[in-house]
Image: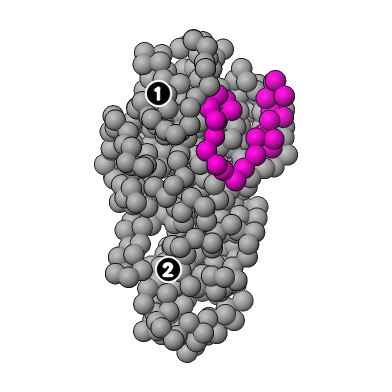
Amino acid sequence: MLLSLGLLFAALSLGRCIPLQQEPNRSKLLLVSFDGFRWNYDQDVDTPNLDTMAADGVKAKYMTPAFITLTSPCHFTLLTGRYLENHGVIHNMWFDTKTGVKLPYYTTQGISSWWDNGSLPIWITAQRQASSIHFPGTKAKYQGEEVHRKLVEPALFNYSNETNWRQSIDTVMEWFTVENLDFITLYFGEPDSSGHKFGPESTQRKDMIKQVDRTVGYLRQSIRESGLESNLNLIITSDHGMETVIKEDEIHIGNMTNFTFKDLDFELLDYGPNGLLVPKEGKLEHVYSVLKNAHPKLHVYKKEEFPKRFHYANHSRITPLLLYSDPGYVIHGKYKVQFNKGEQGFDNEAMNMKTIFRAVGPAFKKELVVEPFESVNVYALLCELLGITPEPHDGSLEVTKPMLRES
């Protein structure tokens, strides 16, 4: 994520799926995402609160995000259980290949047509009281349905401020206790921002993990003090990891031999290790052949030949040519405008793109470490915990069911 969106909303949503009958003391659910939390970020920093949470509940060795490993697409996979080629949020940026218009991350959050592609996020499906703080995707309408109460914070809001984090947690506790909401999603824009700016191995990133851990401690303390410990299930996860950017032998499309941007009708470059191209009529084969072997760390595919394992290219928004680079290498377009020291968006099989999954609460076993799994399976778990019938999805409850006490 390059910019952070802050949203507060609470709503009574009417979705297509009907909740099961619930007891008055049914368990509540809080889903927390710390953006860009790489799977091993807790291994070079003391994290007593995350460690205690793991001892009290469930910890995955790591979680594999969906591809393309960007903030909005990966969060929408968590909320829908769909791969990107099925939910359609294929990038952080809205774009129109016919006009060439591209909108930044923050603006894209409010473009309902970008998000509303037939895959309902769990907020809508839940059909009961649900709420979110900062989570990507909450600003959009789905099948004409809009969240009834929302607060959109300014684009330049300080998302690294620990005081703001605690205020968000206080709001969550109020929503659970005073307003009796059942499901809340809570989003923090760190350690993603620190990883981008300073690099994933930096002192600043390590300091931010300490802040994350303090926040987890404050969150769990707040849950206890609010009397929610016995009926609140807490899941802490993330969208993707972070990779150190390599500054030598860079990939610069504008300098490729025999390549010219005049052969393109549209390009989406300068966004980490990914690229989307629409060649002019009659130029596809030329552009493809020029770029195919232009750099040893660059991978160029025609849409129909893109590796199926990514579950990415089979969507109408995908352009005729797709580019991605090896871990550490970003793709520069006409000019070098990318200066991050850390980056996301790489192959989801790369270890530094893996992320975390922790869970604790009355539904979960204790002191359990589970094998790695794909993030596409989280949605079915959320539906199970909320007692609702899920929409069609690409995951399976069987993957996460061993975490549950009743399994």
Residue found 63% across the figure and 65% down from its top: 307
Occupied quadrant, residue 156: top left
Q: Which residues are magenta?
A: 384-407
Q: Is residue 128 left or right of residue 139?
A: right
Residue on which disc 2 sits: 269
Coordinates of residue 391 in the picture (x, y in percent): 52, 38
Residue found 51% across the figure and 41% down from its top: 80
Residue lying at the far bottom of the rendered structure: 258
Occupied quadrant, residue 292: bottom right
- In primary-sequence order, the first of circles 2 and 1 is 1
Residue 340 or residue 395, whichever sits in front? 395
Q: How is the image coloured?
A: one colour
Residue 176, relative to residue 309: is it above or below? above
Residue 317 or residue 202, whichever sits in front? 317
Report, in whole angstroms, how far the alpha carbon at label 2 lies from the one at label 1. 40 Å
Q: Is residue 245 left or right of residue 147?
A: right
The reply to whether the magenta stretch includes residue 84 is no
Name the secondary structure under disc 1.
strand
Occupied quadrant, residue 305: bottom right
The reply to whether the magenta stretch includes residue 404 is yes
Q: Amino acid at mark 1?
A: Gln
Residue 379, relative to residue 180: is it above or below? below
Residue on which disc 1 sits: 129
Name the secondary structure under disc 2.
strand
Q: Amino acid at mark 2?
A: Leu
Residue found 36% across the figure and 42% down from its top: 143
Residue 289, relative to residue 386: is it above or below? below
Work out which quarter of the rendered image holds the C terminus and state it.
top right
Q: Is residue 236 visible?
A: no
